[in-house]
Amino acid sequence: MARLPRLSLPGYPHHIIQRGNNRQAIFSLPADYQFLLDLLEEQAKKNGVAIHAYVLMGNHFHLLVTPEAADSLPRMMQAMGRRYVRYFNDSQGRSGTLWEGRYRSTLIQTETYLLACMAYMDLNPVRAGLAPEARDYPWSSYGHYAGLRSDKLVTPHPLFWALGNTPFAREAMYAGIVRAGVPAGQQAALTEATLGGWALGDANFVADLQKRVERRVVKTQVGRPARKPAGI
């Protein structure tokens, strides 16, 4: 079956997952994490992509971004991916591929999923046992949003600014969202939609997206429709 074109539209938040080939490590030293973040900053500015949130794990990373043009995101990811592979291969004395195919991505409905996606990303290291709390993990954007440090890579989404009228209020509100956690259903929906390349949102959001693109935006239901009971 032919692979569907990537679902990507300017002005919409995109959740991205890029994995190492066969789940292999893509970072070896702290300098590797920093090199990727520096590449992200450079290529995001060059290609017109706002980086709202990120988390770098041992064998994969997540991004939450909004591209300003149709080709902004693929150009950023391609340039960053190629340069990082060259850097990592040279530093490790290895050759060959590093990534598990192309990056995975989905468009998400802002009001319903953006803050949940940020919290889901920030809690990844906690779920993986890499840190006791989100604030203890150095390779995510949580520290910026919780007021622990300033991260020039991050461009907060307007929905974050709406959390409070002062920096302290916004930081406290966001930290509370992360502490509350993300329901298992939302976690599963974010992962499944991103890996499958399907839009994530309510029926109106999906219908509006479908008018804007030629490819289908949600997974086709398998099997026959359920039969209606007699008399209905």
Image (cartoon, rainbow, N blue to C red):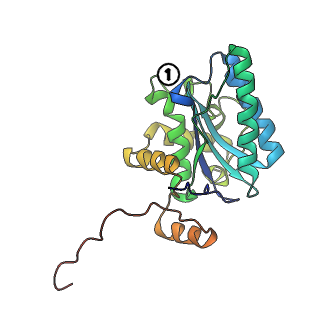
Judging depth in this view, the residue of 132 and 148 nearest the camera is: 132
Where does the C terminus fall, quadrant-wise? bottom left
> Does 162 sit above or below residue 150?
below
The percent position of residue 80, horizontal first and vertical second, equals 74, 36
Q: Residues within 10 Å of mark 1 (few under 14, many from 20)?
A: some
Farthest left residue?
A: 230
Residue picked out by circle 1? 130
Q: Is residue 134 visible?
A: no
Judging depth in this view, the residue of 145 and 53 nearest the camera is: 53
Q: Is residue 14 visible?
A: yes
Picture quadrant where residue 182 is located: top left
The percent position of residue 78, horizontal first and vertical second, equals 72, 41
Farthest bottom residue?
A: 231
Residue found at x 67% / y 24% = 33
Judging depth in this view, the residue of 185 and 92 nearest the camera is: 92
The percent position of residue 136, horizontal first and vertical second, equals 55, 23
Q: Is residue 170 left or right of residue 206?
A: right
Farthest front residue?
A: 1
Q: Is residue 75 left or right of residue 215?
A: right
* Amino acid marked by disc 1: Leu
The percent position of residue 155, horizontal first and vertical second, equals 72, 44
Q: Is residue 115 left or right of residue 152?
A: left
- Numbered disc total: 1
> Does 172 sit above or below residue 26?
below
**For numbered disc 1, what is the local secondary structure?**
loop
Residue found at x 49% / y 50% = 196
Judging depth in this view, the residue of 213 and 191 nearest the camera is: 213
